[in-house]
């Protein structure tokens, strides 16, 4: 590897501090076939979030919103973890990474073997009644193209956070505590622009953590918060990073 390689720098930092937390977003799951929300191929290019992704839109016309949610449920249900998810799970097994804070709702971190996962925006694996709050496994009540309903007759909503809904209190508190107390925050596949998730890297940095960012392009974090930016696909970067950290004694010295 070339001198001053950012992956090697990140490996040295992670090996030295070990007490790392990951913050992940849609970019880590793109290689699993789940499109990002933004960008030309994103879901928001196909569905206007003001019409399909707010709690107000859902309450006004749940059948319409369920057209978008059905696509999300199908994508999440068919997806499998990629090497980036596996890499984070391996870093946890190695005692380097202690938890993952994810903005994703696809459950792929758990499927890859990560045990300490904070689901900041909920997940698509369960449905909740908008009236009585009863919950069901998604596959038990949802059939593609339908609007699922509760035994009480009311509409079921995926147990995810739509725009206009608060972040679950326990998830937000846990995520912020992890950010305040970690040695390294590993940001993977997110530009952290959506509030309040955008606060997590800044909380970590203010508390003294180093911020390592894995994103193909620079983001608003890169210039103001990030200590090490690693451009590249998440799978490739995490595979390389884990490979370096597996070598006894650590990464070779820089030249």
Image (spheres, rainbow, N blue to C red):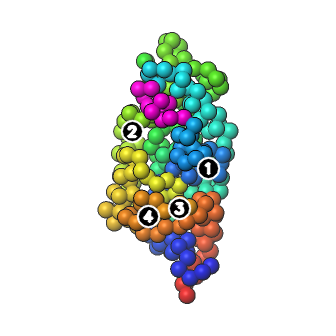
Q: Secondary structure at mark 2?
A: loop
Q: Earlier in the sequence, mark 1 or mark 3?
A: 1
In the rendered image of this protein, does residue 87 appear above or below residue 41? below
Which mark is in front, 4 or 2? 4
Q: Earlier in the sequence, mark 2 or mark 1?
A: 1
Q: CA distance from mark 3 to mark 4?
A: 9 Å
- Residue 222 lies, in percent from the top left, at 43, 64
User: Foreground residue, 230 or 254?
Assistant: 230
Residue lying farthest to the top in this orientation: 153
Quadrant where the N terminus sits is: bottom right
Q: CA distance from mark 4 to mark 2?
A: 25 Å
In this figure, which residue is indicated by the disc labeled 1? 30
Q: CA distance from mark 2 to mark 1?
A: 23 Å
In this figure, which residue is indicated by the disc labeled 4? 222
Residue 184 located left or right of residue 139: left
Which residue does the image show at 64% across and 23% down from the upper left?
145
Whether residue 47 appears in this view of the structure is yes
Mark 4 Cα shell of 10 Å, populated few (<14), some (14-19), many (≥20): some
Disc 4 to disc 2: CB gap under 8 Å: no
- Residue 202 lies, in percent from the top left, at 35, 58
**Main SS type for the magenta part?**
helix
Q: Earlier in the sequence, mark 2 or mark 3?
A: 2
- Residue 178 lies, in percent from the top left, at 39, 54
In this figure, which residue is indicated by the disc labeled 3? 217
The residue segment tinted magenta is: 47-57
In this figure, which residue is indicated by the disc labeled 2? 167
Which residue does the image show at 38% across and 33% down from the upper left?
164
Which mark is in front, 2 or 1? 1
Q: Secondary structure at mark 1?
A: helix
């Amino acid at each position: 590897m070339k001198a001053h390689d950012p992956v090697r720098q990140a490996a040295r930092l992670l090996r030295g501090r070990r007490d790392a937390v990951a913050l992940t977003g849609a970019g880590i799951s793109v290689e699993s076939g789940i499109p990002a929300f933004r960008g030309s191929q994103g879901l928001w290019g196909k569905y206007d979030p003001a019409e399909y992704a707010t709690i107000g839109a859902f309450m006004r016309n749940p059948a319409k919103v369920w057209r978008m949610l059905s696509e999300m449920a199908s994508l999440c249900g068919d997806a499998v973890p990629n090497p980036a998810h596996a890499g984070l799970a391996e870093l946890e097994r190695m005692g380097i990474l202690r938890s993952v804070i994810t903005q994703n709702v696809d459950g792929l971190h758990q499927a890859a073997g990560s045990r300490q996962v904070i689901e900041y925006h909920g997940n698509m694996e369960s449905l909740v009644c908008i009236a009585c709050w009863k919950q069901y496994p998604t596959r038990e009540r949802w059939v593609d193209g339908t609007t699922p309903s509760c035994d009480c007759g009311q509409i079921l909503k995926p147990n995810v956070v739509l725009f206009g809904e608060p972040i679950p209190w326990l998830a937000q508190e846990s995520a912020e505590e992890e950010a305040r107390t970690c040695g390294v925050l590993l940001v993977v596949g997110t530009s952290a622009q959506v509030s309040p998730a955008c606060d997590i890297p800044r909380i970590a940095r203010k508390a003294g953590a180093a911020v390592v960012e894995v994103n193909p392009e620079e983001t608003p974090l890169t210039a103001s918060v990030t200590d090490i930016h690693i451009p590249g696909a998440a799978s490739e970067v995490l595979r390389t990073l884990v490979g370096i950290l597996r070598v006894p004694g650590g990464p070779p010295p820089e030249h």
